[in-house]
Image: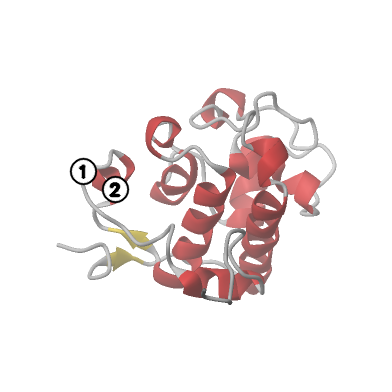
Amino acid sequence: MSDRNVHAAFKRTSEQYDNVVRLARYLVLHRAELEPVLAFGALYNHRDRPADKPLSPPPPLSLGPLAGVAAHEGERLEDYIRRAFAMPLMSDQELWVQDIGWQTTDPSPIGAAMRMLYLLDYGIPHDWHEIMTGESPSDYARNMFLYDILGMYPPDFSPLRG
């Protein structure tokens, strides 16, 4: 079954929607500097860490403060991610974006950004585990409509065909 057929809904406020878009845009725009250092699956071990203290190596959702999504004073990373992005740690939403399995199949900042945007637009694919392990296809990385949410073209897009 295609990931386009069955999805789990992703409930969020308009502020959380905007926060996810802001972070996704940051990941795309800063992909070159983030590519060598981005980590997946590391966030759970840092749940009590202050949200405004950068992690090294950083998982995608921990970069929210650098993207302009402010943490509240003294807010723990776990609480920040739940409040700012509606993605509680170890939830399907959080794991769809940055589970450790992505480290081997798609550890790119753009991949994480596109999974965030896919989540906003379509929800979580029913077969996301299989997508993450490369056993099932998905169009999240090639979905041109997701770049519309960012108001930009994909980085390697050229409107001129030669």
Q: Secondary structure at mark 1?
A: loop
Question: Percent from the top left, x then y, of residue 53?
Answer: 79, 30
Q: Residue at x 22, y 50 (%)?
A: 136
Name the quarter where the N terminus is drawn: bottom left
Residue 71 visible to an observer of this rendering: no
Q: Residue at x 52, y 74 (%)?
A: 162
Question: Percent from the top left, x then y, of residue 127?
Answer: 24, 53
- In the picture, residue 52 is in which quadrant? top right
Which numbered circle lies on residue 55?
none
Q: How many marks?
A: 2
Coloring applied to the structure: secondary structure
Examine the rendered structure and indicate whether residue 56 appears above or below residue 32. above
Instruction: Identify the residue position indicated by label 2 in the image.
Output: 131
Question: Percent from the top left, x then y, of residue 93?
Answer: 44, 51
Q: Badges 1 and 2: C-beta atoms under 8 Å apart?
A: yes
Looking at the image, the residue that sits furthest to the front is 162
Kind of residue indicated by mark 1: Glu
Q: Residue at x 81, y 51 (%)?
A: 70
Residue closest to the eye, 23 or 79:
23
Q: Count residues near mark 1 (Cα–Cα under 10 Å), then give few for <14, some for 14-19, many for 20+.
A: few
Question: Percent from the top left, x then y, of residue 49?
Answer: 70, 27
Examine the rendered structure and indicate whether residue 140 appears above or below residue 162. above
Residue 129 visible to an observer of this rendering: yes
Kind of residue indicated by mark 2: Ile
Instruction: Identify the residue position indicated by label 1 in the image.
Output: 135
In the rendered structure, the answer to whether residue 139 lies left or right of residue 74 reads left
